[in-house]
Image: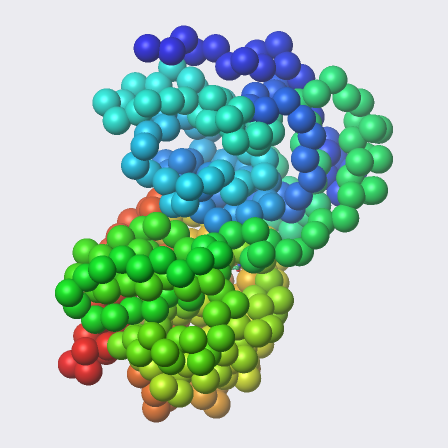
Amino acid sequence: MPQNCVRGDKMKGLIYLEDGTYYEGRGFGKEGTCVGEIVFNTSMTGYQEMLTDPSYCGQIVNMTYPLIGNYGINEIENESNKVYVKGLIAREICTNYSNYMASSDINSMLVKSNVVGVYGVDTRSIAKKIRDCGSLKCVISNKDISVSELKEILNSTQIKHDYMKKVGTKTIIKLKGEGPKIAVIDFGVKQNIIKNLIDRNCDVTILPYETSYDEIVKLNPDGVLLSNGPGDPKEAKEAVETTKKIIKNFPTLGICMGHQILALAVGGQTYKLKYGHRGANHGVYDIELDKAYITSQNHGYAVDSKSIEKEMIITHINLNDMTVEGMKHKTLPVFSVQFHPEGSPGPTDTSYIFDKFISMVKGE
Ligand SMILES: NC(=O)CC[C@H](N)C(=O)O
């Protein structure tokens, strides 16, 4: 059993936010300094899924749950084959894990993946700060560095918004199955979305997000899934154009980024939320089923409800802030959700979304 000692027990850790606030803690993970958008996640578990979720690409994640690492890192709960989170902030880090599945600890994972970590700070007060100020640019470091040096780094570093290019498959991946042929447009797809399709016997083809409409037609899929992914949906201009054609000809499901791209494709608008939704217990109301669900969420943008009214019907709303969580097309077999029906981390109570999609694809 590894000892509960983080390599950085003596390592300094500093967080500096663009409004001038700074926090002193200790360092862990890879020794270094990184700049990114700071976001907070309120899940009590699921740090491994979060670290490997491509939708977090470029972001520094502040975990409000006070103990991170206690069940270790395993070979199974990866949402991709890389750590995409840029930096990690925790109240307390545990490397003395206790779990039969674990084969490594969170500190080793961050070191191996070149990810900077800071712990020993009040992550709940940081979350409150983000809630008050809205989305913030941030720099964290576990090097021997001063606050004024960090400020300088923050001001001189521009955050590049090219995350979509960094994630997702670059080649076509085929996963044979006996059921419906599903083409997944990969904006940074989570493995558990693919797993949900495979569990339903689908024949899955994962396509780079820049795949042309003609190439999709050649595959002759029974349905198309627009995946989750990082960044601003408005940057996926070509994908929006391709989606306009896809929805006229194929049953389509959009998840998270896919939902936002679908909104843009029907002439709607998306906007940046003040501080986003990231957690495993966001209440969502399914209007058609008259039922509330606890969902897993990770998004910083949302669909403007008024802007989609002409083409779409709103099917789900967020019970905290009443933002759009799901919609369906008025005439075409096309629908989408902002939350994550695959959970991971989080409840899988809304996995009925996948069943609904498969039924739709089969024309049931
Ligand atoms: N998980 C996702 O697909 C996130 C979508 C988009 N990048 C957002 O932050 O809103």
> What residue do we see at 67% from left, 26% from top?
32
Residue 80 position, x and y percent, is: 41, 45
Name above or below for residue 274 compared with residue 27: below
Q: In this view, does 41 lie to the left or right of 19?
A: left
Q: Is residue 324 left or right of residue 238?
A: left
Foreground pick, 62 / 36: 36
Dividing the picture into quarters, in which one does residue 99 lie? top left
Q: Which residue is drawn at 56% across and 51% down?
A: 166
Closest to the observer, 287 or 88 = 88
> Does residue 332 lie above or below 177 as drawn?
below
Front position in the image: 305 or 217: 217
Locate residue 220, reporting x and y percent. 31, 78
**Residue 282 showing in the rendered view:** no
Counting from the top left corner in percent of width and height, residue 238 is at: 57, 74
In this rendering, does residue 68 appear at all? yes
* x and y, in percent, of residue 181 in the image: 25, 70
Q: Is residue 311 above or below residue 179?
A: below
Q: Residue at x 27, y 77 (%)?
A: 222
In which quadrant is the C terminus drawn? Answer: bottom left
